[in-house]
Amino acid sequence: MPCNSHADKCIEPGGLIGRNPSRLAHIALAIIFALFTPTAFAYIDPNTGGYIFQLLAPLLALATTAWMFFSDRVKAIWYSILRFFSFKPRQSKTDKN
């Protein structure tokens, strides 16, 4: 059924699920696994928590430093790409005064 402009909600074929119907099944399974997982009764030793922190803190600092260092360069490259593909209207001969 084609989508018309007068409909309040119009879903194109494959709109919510996509072209692959198994995507809905994967989403449903993920929700089921998330809701019905058994209790783990896990224990993290305090020394293990400190070790995990010692691993994650330098990685977080490295990621933050890399972001701060490269963000200006990434923005400059992105804006140069946008400027390259942007529409620039031509001036007519009467506008050159």
Image: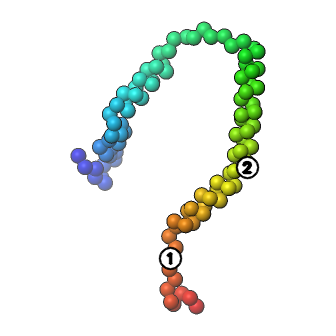
- Relative to residue 43, is residue 16 drawn left or right? left
Q: Of marks 2 and 1, which one's residue comes earlier in the chain? A: 2
Whether residue 91 is situated above or below residue 2 in the rendered picture: below
Total of numbered circles in the picture? 2
Closer to viewer: mark 2 or mark 1:
2
Q: Position of residue 25 (x, y in %)?
A: 36, 27
What residue is at 64 percent from the left and 56 percent from the top?
75
- Relative to residue 27, is residue 56 drawn left or right? right
Whether residue 62 is situated above or below residue 68 in the rendered picture: above
What residue is at 66 percent from the left and 10 percent from the top?
43
Whether pointer 2 and pointer 1 mark residues with C-beta atoms closer than 8 Å, the reply is no
Which residue type does callout 2 highlight? Answer: Phe
What residue is at 49 percent from the left and 86 percent from the top?
92
Q: Position of residue 49 (x, y in %)?
A: 73, 19
Residue located beneath label 2 in the image: 69
**16 or 29: nearer the viewer:** 29
Residue located beneath label 1 in the image: 89
What residue is at 60 percent from the left and 63 percent from the top?
80
Q: Position of residue 78 (x, y in %)?
A: 60, 58
Residue 13 lies in what quarter of the image? Answer: top left
* SS at badge 1: loop
Quadrant position of the C terminus in the picture: bottom right
- Relative to residue 12, is residue 53 drawn left or right? right
Q: Quick one: label 2, few (<14), some, or many (20+) residues within 10 Å?
A: few
Q: Position of residue 94 (x, y in %)?
A: 51, 90
Whether residue 3 is situated above or below residue 36 in the rendered picture: below
* SS at badge 2: helix
Please, which colouring scheme is shown?
A: rainbow
Task: Report the Cα–Cα distance between label 2 and label 1.
Answer: 36 Å
